[in-house]
Amino acid sequence: MIRKSSAKKRFRQFLRNAFARLPRDLRHAIYRAMIDCDPAPDSRLELKVADTREELEDCFRILHDAYVASGFMKPAPSGLRVTIYHALPTTTTLCAKYDGRVVGTMSMIRDGVFGFPLQSVFDISELRAQPGHIAEISALAVHPDFRATGGAILFPLMKFMYEYCTQYFDTRHLVIAVNPDKIELYESLLFFERLQENVVDRYDFANGAPAVGATLDLQRAPEIFRRVYGDKRPRKNLYDYFVSRRLPNIKLPRRRYYTTNDPVLTPATLNYFFNERCQVFDSLDDRRRALLWSIYDQPEYRSVLPLLSEKAQVAPVMRRHQRFSLRCPAEIRFESEGQVHSYAVTVIEISLTGFQVSSQSPIPLGQPGDAIVELGAEESSRMRVRPVREHHAANEFFYGFQLQEPDSTWRRCVGALETLQTGTEL
């Protein structure tokens, strides 16, 4: 048995080496020829946000086993891979379930107080200078029982990620850090572009394994997919699969407000994963502990957060009013010399006393006006406002507005965001 296993490994290594010597374009063409995405997956497959303790635990267990098997982490006593990024409300974990059993997972990390894991080794300053939010795709794993199914779990999971990022996560740029053996899969199929030419020899987030960083512009991706895949048959047409097709297997979250995150961690769940099962909070320095306190500043969370030192307790880590990410349509109206001037804008961030918008046209600063903001499908707020700040980026204008007095709808929305309770059950 040992001899057969060793022979198989040597043969696979021989095939990998032979494949690596082929011209790059030919290698990519071979990858694309192997695409097999079922446009009508088995109805027993369900894709959803992992929002229960049981689903999250199953995701973290599958991830742990996959990372240990690949040498990306050492076995943990808990049998789970849980990182500090999983503790953030700006991180969303997706799961694939087959017959009610979690068989695949992937996490998406929006830019937050800790930045991104890959920032420790890759420079993304040029990407940050471009319009649009960034999200790191991380923690991808499929259960061993389903890895030989020709992408029956992986492709639907990637489809769910694409749809969630473009429709729910307000994300334009994806970034990944993957093993050099896997990067051409992302380059050839999804047209990721490398952040830098050279491979990072040691990536601490993956137990010192080598890594390659890459990015994908989701605004440009549909046209690239159409050009390359638009005339392919259904099981190889990634343009139709990612951009046009709707899979009934995907259960997108229901939201009361047009928020961009789906926080699921209650104080009890946070305590279970980050204090009881894995001692993630114990390993944090004062700065990260203080930042966690600035995020979870509700009384019910304080008993489960890591204790702060005296120095951290007096550090100015919190804003006067917290800001929250949304993406909702709004109209700003100004009256001047008997005429009403109207501006259609997109609200991208709100607080109790103001909000930030993106606009395709310039807005006069300092002039008071009226704002009608659609905070949700059935939640509209009308208030007196004044634009007080502006900056430009590419072809967009960004303005900060100050509220004269938030109305009850606005207060209710901010209250829901502060307590991380933004679902439809409210």
Image (cartoon, rainbow, N blue to C red):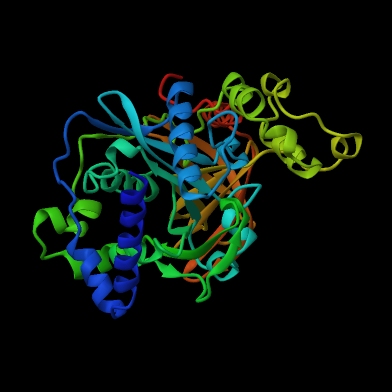
State the residue lying farthest toward the left.
233
- Nearer to the camera, 289 or 18: 18
Residue 148 location, x and y as percent? 25, 45
User: In the rendered image, which quarter contains the N terminus?
Assistant: top left
Report the number of numbered marks: 0
Q: Residue at x 27, y 72 (%)?
A: 27
Which quarter of the figure has residue 182?
bottom left
Residue 186 location, x and y as percent? 35, 62
Q: Residue at x 20, y 35 (%)?
A: 248
Q: Is residue 305 above or below residue 390?
A: above
Q: Is residue 21 above or below residue 269?
A: below
* Left or right side of 322 for 241: left
- Nearer to the camera, 266 or 103: 103
* Left or right side of 358 for 283: right
- Nearer to the camera, 290 or 140: 140
Q: Is residue 389 above or below residue 71?
A: below
Q: Residue at x 37, y 35 (%)?
A: 95
* Left or right side of 248 for 59: right
Q: Residue at x 57, y 22 (%)?
A: 269
State the residue lying farthest toward the right.
310
Residue 235 location, x and y as percent? 13, 53
Is residue 118 visible to us here? yes
